[in-house]
Amino acid sequence: MPEQTDASRDKPSAAPALGPVPVAERVEVIDILRGFALCGIILVDVGDYLREPVGRADQAVQRLIDFFIEASFYPLFSFLFGLGLVIQMTRAEDRGVRFVPFYRRRLAVLLLIGLAHELLLGGNVLHDYAVLGFALLLFRRTSFRTVVVTASLVFLLASVNTSVYSAVERRLRTDTWTIQGSAPSSFEQERAERQERRLRVYAEGTYAELMRMNAGAVVAYFPHLPRALASHPFLGKVFALFLLGLYAGRRGILQNPEGHLPFLRKAMWWGFGIGFGGNFLASGLQFAGYGGLTAGIFESLANPALAAFYGCGIVFLARRAEWKIRLRSLTAIGRTALTNYVFQHFMLTVIFFGFRLNNIVGPVTGLLLCLIIVAAQIAISVLWLRHFRFGLLEWLWRSLTYGKLQPMRIK
């Protein structure tokens, strides 16, 4: 996270100098949480390449991922993005730096990195995070109540939209659209067709097909952006979680967890109850054949609640000396989160497209592959940060944002 260096303030004609945050000033528990989130995200992303579960072991692993991991780790990642804005804003303002122009440059660079990622490796959230980050700037000074109410309303609307979107996809795939004799809108149908094409390419296509599909997505990104922001359920949930992260950051909850232990304890146990209870209710409704709007809303509430349970649990574990040592390996991944996020997608693309494993291996093999990739990420990140200040993409991001090459090696 960027900040101003110790530039002298007695020279009004000179612009304040900016520079990355020294390691000693980073909030370690936030890096741990970011690394933990990345370890779960790869288990979700690998599902695009796997065949349907066959056999009890595959089915058991898939159910565990669906229940405990699916849609519960991206919320944590999104929450930390919103919190990061506050930390950067506070540090910039403490040093007299104009925050908004700097942060806009930072988001613009992230947008370019995200579009390059989309072109080369396929679906990701980086460009969406960048676009939503511009909207998040509007709430940096609003009241706490405005932030929480807006987050709640956006999340509720997105949760309902998720269930409706799932119903649209199911009915379009079976050609049985029968809601009051109406037909889906052209945008809904186009979105469902894109999703169907994406699943086919990931399951059966070549890398050349992936590149062609990705190029079409990049070209269509900005023309489709207004409708996507207005109606895509995933983006609505992401923005709601950005706002909650912004709220937590302005309250200083993770910057000073010792001063907010009662709140964190309540959030952890409420997250446990809502997360596991909501997923059990949704699973029961789906098993009984009622997997519609109600089950979808239960799932939508359960997933971020489970993320809150995981996040607060990590905070409490990190307070214990023995657990802080065990979790420290995640700090290295968290400090190089952008590089590791792209590295995960690069490795999945190489493994499944390079070795033609699309739609061949099941969840058990996919889980083993992910564990190997994560273990390699931990080892490489720890070793890398002994000699270098940033990950490769973090260095590129900062260099482009500040307009000059940043020193890479640790002296």
Image (tube, helix red, strand yellow):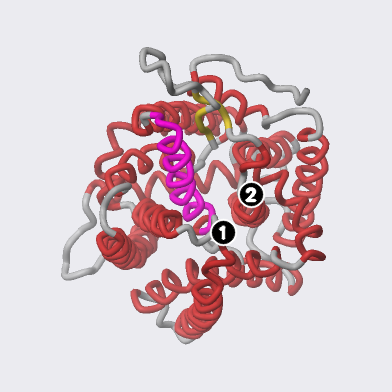
Marker disc for residue 31: 2
Report the residue that reaches farthest toward the front.
Answer: 10
Residue range in magenta is 76-97
Q: Which residue is mark 1?
A: 73
Q: Nearer the viewer, mark 2 or mark 1?
A: 2
Rendered-image quadrant of the C terminus: top right
Residue type (three-letter) at the residue carrying disc 1: Phe
Q: Which one is nearer the viewer's eye here, 192 or 76?
A: 76
At x 40%, y 53%, the residue is 246
The label number, if any, that marks residue 101 in the structure image: none
Judging from the image, what secondary structure is the residue with disc 2 in?
A: helix
Q: Is residue 77 visible?
A: yes
**Tag 2: Cα neighbours inside 10 Å, few (<14), some, or many (≥20)?**
many
- For label 1, the SS is loop
Q: Is residue 234 left or right of residue 57?
A: left
Callout 2 amino acid: Asp
User: Quarter holding the N terminus?
Assistant: top right
